[in-house]
Structures are given as C-alpha cells and as structure tokens.
Image (cartoon, helix red, strand yellow):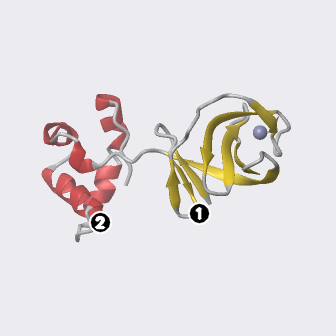
C-alpha cells in the first residue's frame, strides 16, 4: 500500500521515501469511488514515473501514476498516515501531568522496543484524549 505522511507530504512508494517537488492543486480527473472531481495536492517524480497524490471532496485518496511524458499508467490506493509523535520528544513534565511514572516508563520502553508491562500501556492509552486536550499533542502507540 502506498502511504503518504500527513503534514510532511512524504510519500512511501515501493519501499522508498519521496518528497514532493510541487504542491500544486489541479483538477486531475474523477474519483473512481464517488465520481466527484479529483484535485491534486502533491507531485513526485522517480526515475521512471510521475506520481500525483490527489483526493476528492469526500476524502478518497488516490495515487495517480504517469510515465515521464505524462501518459497515464495506473491509479492506486493511497493511505494517509499521521506523523507519529515520539514520546522521547515530549517534555517529561507534560507526560507526568497526565501519566504515572510507570506508564511513562512503559510507553518509552514500548517505543524503543524494550520489555514493558502491557497493563500500563492500556492504562496510558486510555488517557491519550485527555493528553491531547491538555497539550494539543496527539499520541499514538
Ligand atoms: Zn471520492
């Protein structure tokens, strides 16, 4: 599955990370799912193709591929992913305001691939909404 990172517009395509060369908005066709206009929002190029990320007003995302002469090749699904906030990049005092020290320890352990207590992660996860309301930082595990 082709994946696009929200915010940075980095595209993960065939195992490679591509950065957009343009964020032009153009009408590039019609949505196969709902028939409304598809509007481009990021353009990429690799050695053999142009890749265009586009979506319709109903938030259907598609990756349109062209050869280097702009002959259409194929449309593929495109999945959006949020930029993951790394726990170690969040100041400890903020984490401590919402999570217990055991929860913080195990979230960091989980993130760095070390052993952790599952129960603490469950408890921490239940507080993510609260953390987001307080600090505007969306957490994900
Ligand atoms: Zn659509």
**In the image, residue 97 lies at what x, y percent?**
18, 37
Residue furthest to the bottom in view is 115
Q: Residue at x 72, y 50 (%)?
A: 68
Q: Is residue 39 above or below residue 12?
A: above
- Horizontal side, residue 30 vs residue 136: left or right: right
Judged from the image, the secondary structure of the residue bearing numbered disc 2 is helix
In the image, taking residue 123 as reference, residue 56 lies left or right, namely: right
Front in this rendered view, residue 99 or 55:
55
Residue pointed to by mark 1: 14
Quadrant of the rendered structure where residue 58 is? top right
Residue 23 shown left or right of residue 88 in the figure: right
Q: Secondary structure at mark 1?
A: loop
| Residue 31 image point, x, y percent | 81, 40
Point 29% across, 30% down: residue: 135
Which corner quadrant holds the C terminus? bottom left
The residue shown at (29%, 51%) is 124
Q: Which residue is mark 2?
A: 118
Q: CA distance from mark 2 to mark 1?
A: 33 Å
Report the quarter where the N terminus lies: bottom right
Where is 75 relative to 133, above or below? below
Q: Which mark is residue 67?
A: none
């Amino acid at each position: 599955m082709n994946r696009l990172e929200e915010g940075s517009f980095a595209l993960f395509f065939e195992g490679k990370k591509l950065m957009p060369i343009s964020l032009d908005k153009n009408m590039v066709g019609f949505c196969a799912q709902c028939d409304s206009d598809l509007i481009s929002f990021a353009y990429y190029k690799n050695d053999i193709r142009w890749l265009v990320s586009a979506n319709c007003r109903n938030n259907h995302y598609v990756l349109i591929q062209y050869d280097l002469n702009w002959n259409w090749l194929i449309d593929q699904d495109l999945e959006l992913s949020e930029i993951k906030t790394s726990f170690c990049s969040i100041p400890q005092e903020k984490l401590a305001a919402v999570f217990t020290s055991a929860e913080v320890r195990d979230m960091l352990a989980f993130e760095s691939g070390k052993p952790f207590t599952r129960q603490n992660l469950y408890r921490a996860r239940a507080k993510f909404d609260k953390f987001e309301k307080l600090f505007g930082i969306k957490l994900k595990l």
